[in-house]
Image (tube, rainbow, N blue to C red):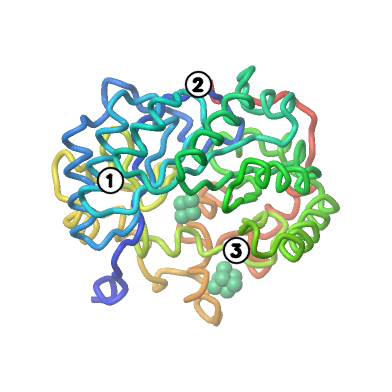
Amino acid sequence: MAQARNRTKPLGLLAELTHRCPLGCPYCSNPLTLERREDELDTATWARVCLEAAELGVLQVHLSGGEPGSRRDLVEIAASARRAGLYTNLITSGVGITARTMRDLWEAGLDHVQLSIQDSDAVSADHIAGYKGAFQRKHALATEAVRLGLMLTINFVVHRANVDRIIEMVDLALALKASRIEIAHVQYYGWALKNRSALMPTREQVDRAVTSVEDLRRKHQGRIVIDAVLPDYHARFPKPCVGGWGRRSLNVTPSGKVLPCHAAESIPDLEFWNVRDRSLADIWASSPAFNAFRGTAYLPEPCTSCERREIDFGGCRCQAFLLTGDGRATDPVCHLSPDHDLVAKAAEIHTDAPYHYRR
Ligand code: SF4
Ligand code: FES
C-alpha cells in the first residue's frame, strides 16, 4: 500500500539507443560493461516503447547513448517519438551525426538538441574526449542545428582539468547561439568513479566555479539560461537523484532493460524487467527494481527523523551502494550521514594519473 501511495507518473524517458560511441570520455555515464550491438532493440520495439511511454504519461524522451548517431535508424526512432506526441530531445556527442542526418531529424520533428562539449579549449576538449578533431565536428553540428532553427543546449561536464574555464565555456555557448548551457560537475559512478582522483577538483576550484556561475547568470540574464549541477562531493546535502527512485523517470537500456536510473545496474541483486517481455506500464508499476527503493519508508536514521527526507529522498541510491555497499543507506554525501567521512576524504585526493578512457 505504501508503494502504491508513493507511486507517481514518470515524466521523462531516457532512451539509451546504443552504448556504441566514437568518444571515450573518462566520466562516461554508461556502465563499465557495455551492451553489444547485436543485443540492441530494433526500430519497431523503440516505436512501441515511445507509444507506451506516452500512454503512461511521459512527456519527454531523451534519445541518448552512447552516441545515438551510431544507430542507422535514429531518424525513424525520432519520428516515432514525435508521432507518439513526445517532446523529443537528442543528446549527442556531435560526432557521428552528419549535416544531412541533422536535417532529416529536423524534418522528422526533433524538438531539441543537447550537445556535449568537453572544454572551451579545442586541444583539451579533444584530449578529454579521447578523439582528435571532435571539437571542430561539434562546432559544425551546433551551427547546423541552429541554422535549422532547433533549440540548442550545450552541456559541459566540469572537473579539475576544465573547471577554471567556465567563463570561456559560456562565451562559447553564446557564440554558438545556444539558448541554454548546462554546467554539470562530474558525478562519480562507473567510469568517473574509476577516474575519481584524476577528475576531482579542489575546494578552491569549486568555490570559484560557484561564484563564477552566479556572476555569469547576472551578466547574461535574458540572453542564455545557465543551469548548474553542483559537485556532490563538496556539498552539505545530497541531490534528490532522478527526482526520487521510481517517481519521475525511467531509463531503457540498448537491450531493453528498464532501470529507475542510468546507474541502477551497479546495485547487485536488483531484478530488472525488459520491454521485450512486458509493457512499460507493467514494469513501472510492478518491476522489483522500481519497487526496491520507492518512497522513504526504508531509509535508516538519520533520514527517518529528518525533515528533508521528502525533499532529497536520502540522496542517491547508487552512490549509497557504491560507497557503503548498502543501497538503503543514507547517501554519504550528506554531512549527517555516519559514512560522510568517505566522501570528505575522497574530495581531498587528487592525482595526475592518466585517464582510464572507456574504451
Ligand atoms: Fe537528506 Fe537523509 Fe541527509 Fe536528511 S539525513 S538531509 S533526509 S540524506
Ligand atoms: Fe542511481 Fe542516483 S544514479 S539513484
Q: Which residue is mark 3?
A: 238
Instruction: Give the quarter of the image for residue 123.
Output: top right
Outermost residue, top side: 132
Q: Which mark is residue 22?
A: 2
Tell me the residue at 64%/27% (across/down): 135
Q: Nearer the viewer, mark 1 or mark 2?
A: 2
For numbered disc 2, what is the local secondary structure? loop
Q: Is mark 3 within 8 Å of ligand 1?
A: yes
Q: Is mark 1 within 8 Å of ligand 2?
A: no
The first of marks 3 and 1 along the sequence is 3
Q: Which residue is mark 1?
A: 272
Residue 245 location, x and y as percent? 40, 61
Tell me the residue at 83%/55% (across/down): 208
Left or right, 51 with respect to 289, comes to: left
Q: Quadrant of ligand 1?
A: bottom right
Q: Measure the alpha-carbon separation of dots 3 and 2.
A: 33 Å
Residue 215 location, x and y as percent? 79, 62
What amino acid type should be assigned to the residue bearing mark 2?
Pro
What amino acid type should be assigned to the residue bearing mark 3?
Pro
